Amino acid sequence: MPKAPLQFPMPFLLAVVLGLFLPASLSADVELPAPRTEGGTALFETLKKRSSAAGGDFSPAEVSLEELSTLLWAATGLNRGESGWTVPMAEGLEPYVDVYVIGNEGVFRYDWKANKLLEISGENIKGQVGHQAFVRRAAWILAFASNPEGLAKLRNAEAGAEFAQVLTGAMTQNVYLAAVALNLGTRYIHSFYPDELKNGLKLPEGSVPIALMLVGK
Ligand SMILES: Cc1cc2nc3c(=O)[nH]c(=O)nc-3n(C[C@H](O)[C@H](O)[C@H](O)COP(=O)(O)O)c2cc1C
């Protein structure tokens, strides 16, 4: 008996044809280049150079994605396989402070597992988050905010807010040290508008913004 020709429904054919012409993904997530993890300034030299860049020192010069990737890895990257990080976490938990990245092209959350920036919005909010006028001049602004889901895993739950502050201190100090190695400027900023950050970063319920780090040349 002759075989009947294969029949495909019209929506399936349309999807195949459209798939040929549309980009593979419409998401604006950013795959980061691998961070730099070799060389750099020796530790004691780095400690001698650690400092905050003056506000007036931030220029519009670009900071590359490789440099950004290195700073983010220093702040909260895996350094020992699947469950060891560059910063110490209470009870050995996964990071319970998230790092957000604010740039000219939009707002992202750093995914430390995938070394990727997950798009939150395509808006440039650099001019809205800090009290000081120079904040907007940083090439990138890193924002640190507690992750309520992560903190909920603590046995010592009542210490959560305090532990998130401690973790932010460790993360931001690592950013200071990595910035020395990369010859970049950075500055810790506490004078920010929490509500602007909550809206601009689309923070989940219960997440508290803790600090900003300006990054520039
Ligand atoms: C908790 C904390 C909050 C800070 N807040 C701000 C701030 O809102 N604006 C600012 O320009 N610098 C801020 N800084 C940076 C300090 O002013 C800076 O670290 C200090 O002047 C010492 O300079 P150094 O980091 O070069 O040693 C803050 C630093 C810390 C640790």
Image (cartoon, grey):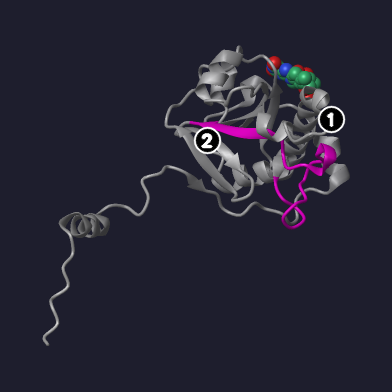
Residue 127 is one of the magenta-drawn residues? no
Q: Which residue is mark 1?
A: 156
Looking at the image, which residue is at 78% across and 48% down? 41
Q: Residue 191: percent from the left, percent from the top?
A: 67, 14
Q: Quadrant of the C terminus?
A: top right
Indicate which quadrant contains ligand 1.
top right
Looking at the image, which residue is at 57% across and 27% down? 138
The part of the chain drawn in magenta is 77-103
Q: Quadrant of residue 6?
A: bottom left
Residue 139 in the figure: left or right of residue 180: left
Q: Quadrant of the N terminus?
A: bottom left
What amino acid type should be assigned to the residue bearing mark 2?
A: Phe
Residue that sits furthest to the bottom in the current view = 1
Earlier sequence position, callout 2 versus callout 1: 2
Give the answer, above or below, for where 143 lies relative to 117: above
Give the mark toward the camera: 2 or 1: 1
Q: Is the CB atom of the residue marked by disc 1 within 8 angstroms of ligand 1's nearest atom?
A: no
Q: CA distance from mark 2 to mark 1?
A: 30 Å
Q: Does the image show residue 126?
A: no
Q: Which residue is mark 2?
A: 108
Q: Closest to the observer: 190 or 95?
A: 95
Q: Residue 214: percent from the left, percent from the top?
A: 63, 28
Q: Does the image show residue 195?
A: yes
